[in-house]
Amino acid sequence: MTRRRHKQRARSDESGQALVEYAIIVAGLMGLLVGASFTFLPDFVRALQQYYDSFYIMLNLPIP
């Protein structure tokens, strides 16, 4: 009788379900983040390069 109860409890036990749901959500968010980085990363790098170039120009001006 105890084996039967144990098998029924094992079938209805939902341990690990929250972990699986959390893993699926995190994987989806990471996929979106990677996809967004491919579209926005070149623009961010270009803007950062212009920002550093402007410092280089200002530091090398011939005005004392």
Image (cartoon, helix red, strand yellow):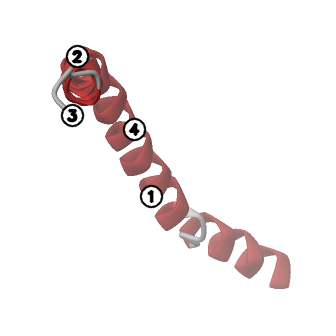
Element on which disc 3 rests: loop
What's the CA distance linking mark 4 and mark 3? 50 Å
Please tell me whether mark 1 sits on a helix, a strand or a loop. Answer: helix
Front tag of 2 and 1: 2
**Is disc 2 placed on a helix, strand or loop?**
helix
Instruction: Let me know if residue 1 appears in the view.
Output: no
The residue under the point 58% across, 72% down is: 13
Find out whether the residues at labels 2 and 4 contact each other: C-beta distance under 8 Å: no
Which of labels 3 and 1 is toward the front? 3
What is the secondary structure assignment of the residue under circle 4?
Answer: helix
Disc sitting over residue 22 in the figure = 1
**Residue identified by numbered label 4:** 30
Find out whether the residues at labels 1 and 4 contact each other: C-beta distance under 8 Å: no
Amino acid type at mark 3: Pro
Which circle's residue, 2 or 1, is located before the other in the chain?
Answer: 1
Quarter the C terminus occupies = top left
Point out which mark residue 64 bears: 3
Say what amino acid the circle numbered 2 marks: Arg
Which label number is shown at residue 4?
A: none
Q: Amino acid at mark 4?
A: Met
User: Which is nearer the eye, 62 or 21?
Assistant: 62
Q: Position of residue 10 (x, y in %)?
A: 68, 69
- Mark 4, residues whose alpha carbon is within 10 Å: few (<14), some, or many (≥20)? few
Q: Quadrant of residue 29?
A: top left
Going from N to C along the chain, the mark reached first, 3 or 2, is 2
